Amino acid sequence: LEYAIIEVVDNGEGFDLDKTMSDKAARSSIGLITMKERAEMLGGNLTIDTAYGKGTRIFVRIPISQRADSLEVHHSAINYEH
């Protein structure tokens, strides 16, 4: 099985992940829950590593082999003629 890997790293201020994930307003405005749900919906996972003064690292791993097969089927059903 092959995977697509996405890693986003910054050297910013970081944040308190537990506090952010428990704050309803913060959860809906920054989209971390949505990003995690979408990664899981594709059979992958999302990891967030952050703390004040450490910056933030977001790591996403999504399987592409089985996903590519279903995309080919979907792609072949699209009519590109206008």
Image (spheres, rainbow, N blue to C red):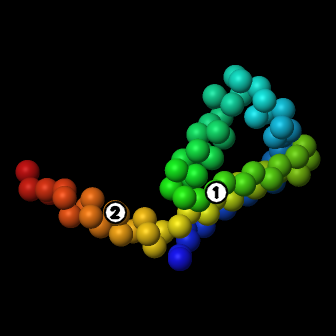
Q: Are marks 1 and 2 in contact (CB under 8 Å)?
A: no
The residue under the point 19% across, 56% down is: 78
SS at mark 1?
Answer: strand
| Image x and y of residue 69, in percent | 36, 69
| Image x and y of residue 74, in percent | 27, 59
Q: Residue furthest bottom?
A: 1
Residue 8 seen: no
Q: Nearer the viewer, residue 6 or 23?
A: 23
77 horizontally vs 43: left or right: left
Q: Which mark is residue 71?
A: 2
Q: Which mark is residue 45?
A: 1
In the image, residue 35 above or below residue 59? above
The residue under the point 51% across, 56% down is: 42
Q: Residue furthest left?
A: 82
Q: Earlier in the sequence, mark 1 or mark 2?
A: 1
Among the 4 quarters of the image, the one containing residue 28: top right
Residue 79 seen: yes
The residue under the point 80% across, 53% down is: 49
58 horizontally vs 82: left or right: right
Q: Inspect the image, locate mark 1, and give the three-letter code of the amino acid beneath it.
A: Asn
| Image x and y of residue 36, in percent | 63, 47
Among the 4 quarters of the image, the one containing residue 70: bottom left
Q: Which mark is residue 65?
A: none
SS at mark 2?
Answer: helix
The residue under the point 58% across, 44% down is: 37
26 horizontally vs 79: left or right: right
17 horizontally vs 67: left or right: right
Label tally: 2
Q: Inspect the image, locate mark 2, and give the three-letter code of the amino acid beneath it.
A: Leu
Spatial CA distance of label 1 from label 2 is 20 Å
In the image, residue 41 above or below residue 34? below
